Image (cartoon, rainbow, N blue to C red):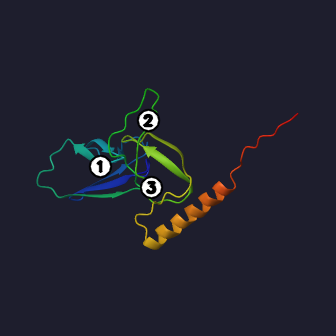
Amino acid sequence: MKPGSFFFHCDVEGVTSDYYDTWANGTLETTSTYAIDPFVNYVTGEFGRSSNSAWDGYTVSFTASYTYYHFNVTPAAGVSTDALGAFTVNITVPDIWNGTEPVTVIDETGNMTAGDFIVYGSSVVPEALTVGAIVLLSSAALVVSFYWLRKKPTNKIVKCS
């Protein structure tokens, strides 16, 4: 979820309130006088609020909207940072092409940074080769190695008197 883009509307049997992600820090501003600590988690997508009044027996409905990024890449495990906030993490990259892609990293409370992710060379690994492809690749390797061996420089001894 893109910080600053989240909004939700709450309807408790005709009593409505709106929640805005004004500060992009995981807390929400609201028009409700009953809401306590409304929040949004930008990583998990969870959002909510507490109330100082009982909702037992009431029908409550929520409507939410937000902007999200093109790819959703999340590390398999938690990410630890050093004292400066730097981190290293392994992720599975979606099928992307060679070149530079912008990367935005966001934590649960909206802290974010951006950088470039650069892909060099083909990232596609063939899963299976046909017999014809193996023969073709083997032949090409044989031709290249034969050419290299034939053109390999030799040392010559020269006598000077």
- Seen at 51% across and 44% down, the residue is 114
- Which of the pair 64/83 is nearer the observer? 83
Secondary structure type for disc 3: loop
Q: In the image as oriented, which residue stretches furthest toward the bottom?
A: 132
- Read off the residue under disc 3: 69
- Quarter location, residue 67: bottom left
- Seen at 77% across and 40% down, the residue is 157
Q: Amino acid at mark 1?
A: Glu
Q: Answer left or right for 95 relative to 58.
A: right
On the image, the x and y values in percent for residue 11 come to 25, 57
Q: Earlier in the sequence, mark 1 or mark 2?
A: 1
- Read off the residue under disc 2: 87
Secondary structure type for disc 1: loop
- Which of the pair 52/4 is nearer the observer? 4
Observer-side mark, 1 or 2, equals: 2
- Seen at 33% across and 40% down, the residue is 78
On the image, the x and y values in percent for residue 66 come to 40, 56
- Seen at 44% across and 35% down, the residue is 87
